[in-house]
Image (cartoon, rainbow, N blue to C red):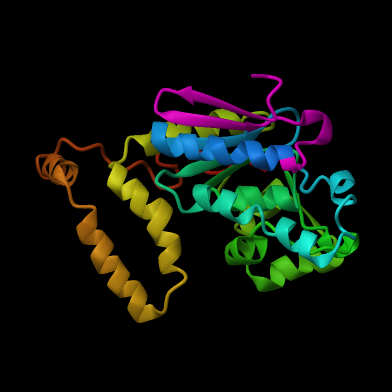
Amino acid sequence: MAEEVVTYELDGEIALIGLNRPDKRNSISDSLREGLAPALARAQNEAKAGVIFGHGDHFCAGLDLSEALQWVNAPPEVRLRRRGNLHPVLDVMARGYIPFVAALKGATIGGGLEIASAAHVRVADESTFFALPEGQRGIFVGGGGSVRIQRLMGFARMADLMLTGRVLTAHEGERFGLCQYVTPKGDSLERAKQLARRIAKNAPLTNWAVASCLNRVNDMSHNDGLFMETLISQAVNSQRSYDGLKAFVEHRADRLVEPGKSGDGGETIAKS
């Protein structure tokens, strides 16, 4: 599948989705967006968790600007159809049935950061750098970043990146909420797979509630959020719930990992 712009592999219970334009730093073209949509839909039906990553040295350098030049001055009705066309694609990942882990490296900027922000867990290696250079390009985020990235890092930090062209290291990105883990260079994909396999062991209905419902609660008022929580907490109850509680009561359940470790027992952040 090396010739495919988006690669797909089912590895046991996890789906591996790769952005495959390494000569263009995996920048977002029409063909990449069109290839990403069916891959994400397929993962929802086949896997219990997903991993999204970039082939080559970078995760994704954002919008393919050479392609964008062909339509940026097009009539308003043409631009309207193009801007926002990544929203429904990324919503499948952000609010679908299964959780996704993003494995980041190198350039994770602009639209690439928007793709990463749609995942539920983000693992960056130490080569990763984050930026939102829209201000310098005369454009604005168009892949959901004004919502997702702002919720991860806050208005002030996002505005700083967009207005000044500031570039963040992997460790700065972790401190600012853009990723939850930092690994040594070259290790982010393997760590993302490990975490995805751990996630796939969870009760499927609980994974669905975290992946699809938790972020919707974030959209609601306080009272509506509590009401939704009550509904979802009842909806996820199943035989798996009973078996899990019974195993805990009978001292058969896995113990929690040590503080400072992730759910799979690994380090949460590389030593800087």
Residue at 74% from the left image edge and 42% from the top image edge:
30
Query: In the rendered view, does 89 fall on the left or right side of 33?
Result: left
Extent of the magenta region: 1-30
Q: Is residue 256 left or right of residue 72?
A: left
Among the 4 quarters of the image, the one containing residue 20: top right
Query: At 34% from the left edge and 54% from the top edge, which residue is drawn?
Result: 209
**15 magenta-colored:** yes
* Residue 86 image position (x, y, % from top left): 65, 52
Q: Is residue 135 in the magenta section? A: no
- Nearest to the observer: residue 204 or residue 189: 204
Residue 37 x, y percent position in the rendering: 58, 41
* Quarter of the view holding residue 220: bottom left
Q: Tell me if residue 74 can be seen.
A: yes
Q: How many marks?
A: 0
| 27 vs 100, nearest the viewer | 27
Asked if residue 60 shows in the view, the reply is no
Which quarter shows the N terminus? top right
Is residue 230 depicted above or below 246 in this figure? below
Quadrant where the image shows the C terminus = top right
In this image, 24 relative to 98: left or right?
right
Q: Nearer the viewer, residue 200 or 96?
A: 96
